[in-house]
């Protein structure tokens, strides 16, 4: 119950008090703060609303309450308590994950500064700052089980789409202490500078951007080995959840599937796992020659902007890829074809201009090599001048191949439309990775111990899970925001907290004044049925002490 004005009448005078009723079991308990006679009380009431407060500070509450309602709906704190065996630690971790999701700063700033300006400060019981790291060490032992239990609880509350599980990976950068060189877990890959350590994060998400599984691996782990271990783990340890997912797909980058690992990947089918990848450009030409692009049907369309629709045409076939029979989809996108033709024409014109301007022959050769136009352009000397001869047939042949790409899979039952749709769903995982890196600032990781690097990464994924579930709930209510827009909106609600003093009062009053919310945030509170805290006041230290 909120405070309201209460009138107290005596024989000759009228007094004003603030009154609040609170239920305790079956009884109603009333609290009073006496403000004095009516004239003085009216002045105090006005000052309570507008007068600057002593030790005034802004306190965030909206994002904490909204994400807190999502966490409560899946019993996240109880799941944490199940594995940490300590209610205090579980509640502290729950609050830290929520706060870190809203305000992605370092652990030190989060605990020492951000928490002090959050509504969560009173419900986060930490004895000292370093306890945060001790909590992480406890969390590390059961991160996969915690996420599994949270997802199982979420599936009971929210309408989660379990039609497909899309699996992909990204690299997370790690800050490296140049003096101690303590990073061990974040080995860099062969293609990266050795001074840039990193780890691999694998996500398995559904079509609603909800992460169902997550795990981390050293940065030098080969993709195929990493996915194999990840798949074995979720199929054995979390079979109860994976059994509800109709089909599971791993989306591989072009080139990650090759003649050395194709047999192993084809065997994944026995475990209920399918892969989709793009055939290398160097080997797709012979397949593309078998189709006539003028006869290809539309298999995919999407509105890019108002009245602008991109279409993909395609044909599905059974062909040999790396000498193994595979389901192959030849795709043609005229928009990509048109764009690449324009880029090619610009490159040719630039080379011609270099020759016309009399630039050095070696520089022109270098530019031709950079643009991969050695077969299409030839440098000739004419009257002591350099000219560029264009081989039109080579240019035209190259343009005819633009716009094509070839997908292949070990799933023999997919139609052309289903195959391209699942491959395009990779964008869902990529959007999740962008949200983790841009909006949740998952990297660089400022830890040197292997276990804490892993724990930090998965804790951020826990926050991403809560945000994704919020998005699912809002989408069901016809409210749509991007990840970044939603995060900024829900954390925008603040209140002012401070002390009010008046010589007419025996005690100082501690005030909580909510600042008016934006209409969009007000709607989210209403739709999610989260009760927003109103004006609050309580008596504290007497003014004459």
Image (tube, rainbow, N blue to C red):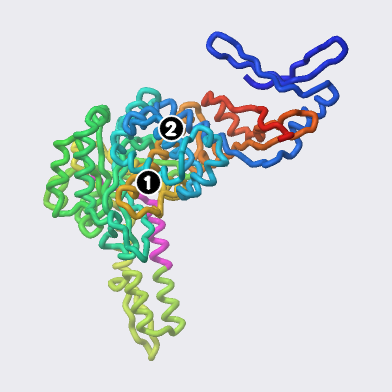
The x, y position of residue 171, in whole percent, is 33, 53
> Residue 264 in magenta?
no
Left or right: 25 in relation to 137: right
Query: Does dot 1 land on a helix, a strand or a loop?
Result: helix
Residue drawn at x 71%, y 39% is 53
Reply above or below: 328 against 80: below
In the current view of this chain or complex, which residue is farthest to the bottom?
Answer: 384
Query: Badge 1 local density, few (<14 within 10 Å), some, or many (20+)?
Result: many
The answer to which of 127 and 247 lies nearer the viewer is 127
The answer to which of 8 and 290 lies nearer the viewer is 8
In the current view of this chain or complex, which residue is farthest to the right?
Answer: 12
Look at the image and tell me whether residue 412 can be seen. yes
Corner quadrant of residue 512:
top right
Mark sitting on residue 514: none
**Segment tinted magenta in the rendering:** 328-346
Residue drawn at x 51%, y 39% is 486
Reply above or below: 180 against 454: below
Q: Does the CB distance between marks 2 and 1 fall below 8 Å?
A: no
Reply above or below: 414 against 427: above
Left or right: 241 in relation to 480: left
The residue that label 1 is drawn on is: 456
The residue that label 2 is drawn on is: 91
Query: Does dot 2 land on a helix, a strand or a loop?
Result: helix
Reply above or below: 233 against 173: above
């Amino acid at each position: 119950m909120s405070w309201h004005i209460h009138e107290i009448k005596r024989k000759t005078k009228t007094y004003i008090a603030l009154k609040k009723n609170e239920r305790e079991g079956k009884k109603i308990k009333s609290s009073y703060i006496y403000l004095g006679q009516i004239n003085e009380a009216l002045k105090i009431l006005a000052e309570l609303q507008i007068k600057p407060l002593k030790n005034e500070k802004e306190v965030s509450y909206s994002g904490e309450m909204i994400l807190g309602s999502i966490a409560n709906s899946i019993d996240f704190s109880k799941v944490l308590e199940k594995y940490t065996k300590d209610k205090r630690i579980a509640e502290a971790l729950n609050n830290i994950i929520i706060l870190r999701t809203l305000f992605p700063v370092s652990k030190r700033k989060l605990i020492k500064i951000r928490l002090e300006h959050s509504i969560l400060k009173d419900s986060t019981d930490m004895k000292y700052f370093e306890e945060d790291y001790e909590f992480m060490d406890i969390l590390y032992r059961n991160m996969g089980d915690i996420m599994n239990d949270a997802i199982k609880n979420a599936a009971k509350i929210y309408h989660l789409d379990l039609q497909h599980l899309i699996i992909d990976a990204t690299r997370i950068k790690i800050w490296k202490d140049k003096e101690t060189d303590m990073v061990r877990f974040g080995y860099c890959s062969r293609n990266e500078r050795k001074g840039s350590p990193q780890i691999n994060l694998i996500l398995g998400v559904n079509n609603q951007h909800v992460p169902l599984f997550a795990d981390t691996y050293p940065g030098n782990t080969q993709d195929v080995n990493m996915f194999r271990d990840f798949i074995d783990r979720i199929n054995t340890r979390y079979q109860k959840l994976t059994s509800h997912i109709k089909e599971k797909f791993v989306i591989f980058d072009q080139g990650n599937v090759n003649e050395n690992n194709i047999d192993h990947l084809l065997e994944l089918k026995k475990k209920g796992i399918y892969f989709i990848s793009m055939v290398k450009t160097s080997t797709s030409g012979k397949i593309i020659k078998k189709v006539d692009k003028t006869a290809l049907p539309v298999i995919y369309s999407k509105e890019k902007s108002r009245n602008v629709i991109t279409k993909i045409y395609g044909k599905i076939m059974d062909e040999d890829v790396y000498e193994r029979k595979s389901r192959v989809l030849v795709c043609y996108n005229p928009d990509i074809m048109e764009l690449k033709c324009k880029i090619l024409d610009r490159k040719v014109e630039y080379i011609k201009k270099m020759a016309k301007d009399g630039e050095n022959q070696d520089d022109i050769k270098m530019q031709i090599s950079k643009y991969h136009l050695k077969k299409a352009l030839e440098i000739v000397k004419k009257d002591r001048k350099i000219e560029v001869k264009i081989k039109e047939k080579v240019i035209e042949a190259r343009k005819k191949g633009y716009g094509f790409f070839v997908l292949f899979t070990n799933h023999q039952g997919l139609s052309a439309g289903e195959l391209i749709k699942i491959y395009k769903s990779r964008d869902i995982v990529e959007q999740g990775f962008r949200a983790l890196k841009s909006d949740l600032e998952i990297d660089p990781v400022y830890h040197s111990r292997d276990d804490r690097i892993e724990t930090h990464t998965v804790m951020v994924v826990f926050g991403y899970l809560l945000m994704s579930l919020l998005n699912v709930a809002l989408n069901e209510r016809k409210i749509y925001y991007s990840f970044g827009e939603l995060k900024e909106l829900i954390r925008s609600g603040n209140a002012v907290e401070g002390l009010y003093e008046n010589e007419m009062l025996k005690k100082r009053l501690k005030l909580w004044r909510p600042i008016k919310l934006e209409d969009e945030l007000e709607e989210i509170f209403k739709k999610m049925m989260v009760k927003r805290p109103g004006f609050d006041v309580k008596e504290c230290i007497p003014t004459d002490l």
